[in-house]
Amino acid sequence: MGNTAVYTLILIFTTIFAKVLGFARELSLAYVFGASAVSDAYIVAFSIPTIIFSGIGTAILTSYIPIYTNLQNNRPKELRKFSDSVMTMIFLVSVAVLAVFLIFDRQIVRLFAVGFTGSTMDLAVELSGLMMISILFIGVYYILQGYLQIHGSFFAVGMVSVPLNIAVILSICLSNEEHYRWLGWGVVIGYGAAFVMLLIAAKRKGFRFRPCFDFGDKNIRHLLVVVFPIFLGKAITQLNTMVDRTIASVLPEGSVSALSYANRITGFVTAVFVVSVATAIFPQLSRFSATNNIRKMKRSFATSAGLMSLIVLPISAGAMVFSREIVALLFLRGAFTEQDVEATAQVLFFYSLGLLAFSIKDVMLNVFYALQDTKTPTVNSVLALVINTVLNILLLKPLGVKGLALATTLSGTITLLLLAWSLRRKIGRLGLRRLIISLVKMTVATVLMAAAVRPVYDLLFGATESLLLSFCVAVAAGGLIYVAANILLRTQEMGVVIVTVGERALALVHRKDA
């Protein structure tokens, strides 16, 4: 638990830094190009290499870690050959994808931008051609991320998008409507820099590579068999979002936007906190699976779910209590009206109800992937799609766009329970008694926090009429109340976090003194 807490905290802070830089990237683009043909072409071009390889890359990463860990523990002589073959195969696939794109560039770009014509289309095609060079780095750096996670090096993993964002920001600042090619080269340089950063970090952990073309090896065949259902499951999850937006399109104007904006807010929470915990715990789960240590795997899952709950519960409650204020702070400017704030806040409230369920489900999915069971998560994703679609239809008329958010929350909760039932059948009793006790304590602390923050906010806002100041002070007060309540209740996960942070702080002080 100690190492997991450390890795999680590293990933949380590095991810927040990377997200801030990502936001600065969007601001830079808006400042230099505004809403123009260049910015439209750039956004489409930038999305193409990411969309093409992100799903495949994530699926390969999720498959690579448990197979590598299993070989590391049981057949170490096959390890080097497996890793070299995977790297070689991914690079060759990247070259093939790049070649296909260069031949059919205009047709592929049109799939991503059906409305582009004339000079905007020409610009998108030209920028896409440059940016697609980065695909030579994108595929391989997923494997390097997996290698670093296995070897406990999470700082570089958390910082992976930082070189990209810095390079893109600089390229935007160097560009104008006449010298727009810098936009394309900035993306290539950024992905290349991210690859070099990961490669240096991996070499420090003993990574070595030489090309290997034995793609008929049994471990490579196993990887390919495992990859497809993981990719399918993640694609179905994206399809769920598309179904929500399609159904929302029959509702009054602005409903699709309300879903999108609220989803972006909860997506930030998921990316920073949930993914951090899931990423930190996955190599550990894979090691326990490789050594068939199911008891430790159960304990690791329970402690990770507890750490996740400690973070997500107060955020979820805060997002419900301050849904309107959060949306207003982020979006209430320009053409975004008070009516838009109200609609988006209502959607955010119902999305926030399901944050904890989705968070624990993400960790539970990693248990199945560590066990190299990809069938169960895929079936669960299909069930989630079916349940979500049925609930969308049932709740659409009485609740409107709020019903779509509630349907997502309910389908996530139902499929979490089904997934837990499947896991219990697979590995036996999960030993969640200690987690349930912690959840009760966290819930009590969350209720105390939620009861206190609203009066604090109302009092300050009445005195200052400053939304930002009142919100920040209320959140700080709520955080202190939540931490103090968990300490008084002796919540185990809070104790672990405090001890871990204290130990790291002391280690840094001793390092400076030395």
Image (cartoon, rainbow, N blue to C red):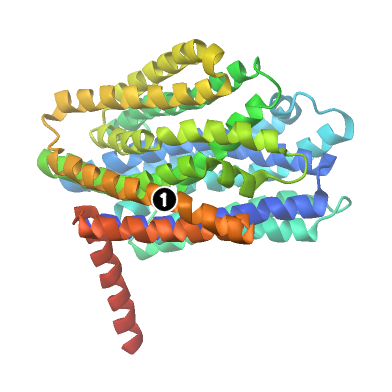
Would you say residue 193 is visible in this rendering? no
* Left or right relative to 122: residue 46: left
Which one is nearer the viewer's eye here, 207 or 144? 144
The residue lying toward the viewer, choosing from 105 and 194, is 194
Q: Badge 1 local density, few (<14 within 10 Å), some, or many (20+)?
A: many
For residue 151, above or below residue 225: below
The quadrant in which residue 151 appears is: bottom left
Name the residue rendered at 39%, 58% in the picture.
479
User: Residue 343 appears at what percent x and percent y?
Assistant: 61, 31
Tell me where residue 488 appears, x and y as whole percent: 21, 59
384 with respect to 133 (left or right): left
Residue furthest bottom in the image: 513
Q: Which part of the image, by quadrant, shows the C terminus?
A: bottom left
Residue type highlighted by circle 1? Gln
Question: Is residue 132 in view?
Answer: yes
Q: Tell me how many marks there are.
A: 1
Residue 342 sits above or below residue 200 on the image: above
Which structural element holds mark 1? helix
- Residue picked out by circle 1: 145
Q: Nearer the viewer, residue 392 or 450?
A: 450
Residue 43 in percent (x, y) is at: 71, 41
Q: Is residue 218 above or below residue 476?
A: above
Quadrant (top left, top right, bottom left, bottom right) of the N terminus: bottom left
**Which residue appears at 51% of the width and 45% of the height?**
322
For the point 36% across and 85% down, the residue is 512
**Relative depth, front residue between 175 and 216:** 175
Q: Position of residue 375 (x, y in %)?
A: 30, 22
Who's the residue at 21% across and 23% down the image?
Answer: 421
